[in-house]
Amino acid sequence: MTALPDRYAVIGHPVEHSRSPDIHGAFARQTGQNLVYERLPAAPDAFAPTVADFFAAGGAGLNVTLPFKGEAAAYADRLTDRARRAGAVNTLARDHDDRLLGDNTDGIGLARDLERQLQMPLTGSRILILGAGGAVRGVIPVLFEHGAAAIHVANRTAAKAEAIAADFSDLGTIRASTLTGASGGWDIVINAISAGLAGETPDVSPTVLEDARGAYDMIYADKPTPFLRWVASHGIERRCDGFGMLVEQAAESFALWRGVRPQTAEVIKALRPGGDRQPS
Ligand code: ATR
């Protein structure tokens, strides 16, 4: 008799356009793991009951996306250090004693993609991050873990950037400013401003790119994002959107759940929106 597949899902609102089922489906085929991975929509006020029902019905693990990452951190029985530092969980796994472990794999996803796609080692790097939302809190601990020498967070609302700098100052050198207050001297410039989705370019001076060897947009699209077009127009050749980060964070979740690490390069290539090409 064939065993029933283990059930996984991504919970969010909205979740209809999530690429996670395609990515985990590809990982499962590649590694021969017997699992199904679906979308789990939840109304904005129904995160906890939807998660409880999913696990009560035998579900094995969840990815968590907007707007529930903070709620998932509060819901988990235990948190990994990086999830606690982020205050956000994107992965829920049944622990050995059946309690729920919350992890945050977004930062490791970014770090792996920066080091592989952009070929930019993080050790000793000076990093400018544009934006100070939840996503930034998820990635800062891992950037320091991978050896970042200094991080500057620049945000439209300076107070939010300052709060992040204060919260993570025990991990390394971290400073904050407004977007217009940021100057040059950064090896890598990372965009985490969600307005990139709306097609706006950030209100930031091109001088921030003066010494940059690479630029990364945490957003991805089927064509070059406004941020990537902006950095390209200022001569930054190494640049990359966030699709690889999505696949890499998924690989880390998959490894946590299944104890098997999938190969990501071929999945990034096969599933990249807009086809198999580097954004330019
Ligand atoms: P996420 O979880 O994706 O980081 P978020 O927490 O809503 O999302 O954060 C969105 C980020 O985009 C914030 O840094 C926000 O700046 P504020 O803190 O000043 O709100 C930034 N952002 C959104 N729209 C923006 C715009 N039009 N111009 C500049 N920054 C913008």
Image: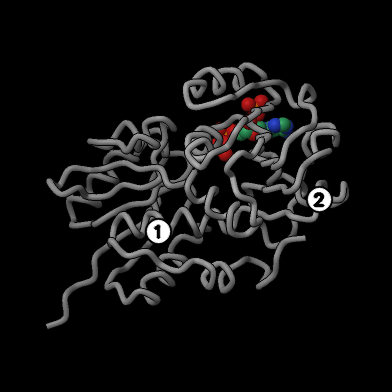
Give the residue furthest to the bottom. Answer: 1
Give the residue furthest to the front. Answer: 124
3D distance between C-alphas at marks 1 and 2:
37 Å
In the displayed structure, 116 sits above or below 86; it is: below
According to the picture, the residue beneath numbered tag 1 turns out to be 39
Residue occupying image coordinates x 34% and y 40%: 47
Please state which amino acid type lies under the numbered disc 2: Ile
Earlier sequence position, callout 1 versus callout 2: 1
Q: Percent position (x, y) of residue 179?
A: 75, 26
Q: Is mark 1 within 8 Å of ligand 1?
A: no
Helix, strand or loop under label 1: strand
Please state which amino acid type lies under the numbered disc 1: Arg
Q: Is residue 267 visible?
A: yes
Few, some or many residues within 10 Å of mark 2 (<14, 14–19, 20+) = some
Residue occupying image coordinates x 62% and y 16%: 159
Q: Are marks 1 and 2 in contact (CB under 8 Å)?
A: no
> Regarding ligand 1, which quadrant of the image does it lie in?
top right
The reply, left or right, for residue 32 in relation to residue 184 is left
Mark seen at residue 236: 2
Q: Percent position (x, y) of residue 117?
A: 62, 59
Q: Percent position (x, y) of residue 145?
A: 47, 38
Picture quarter with the N terminus: bottom left
Residue nearest the viewer, comparing 187 with 130: 187
Residue occupying image coordinates x 72% and y 44%: 198
Picture quarter with the C terminus: bottom right
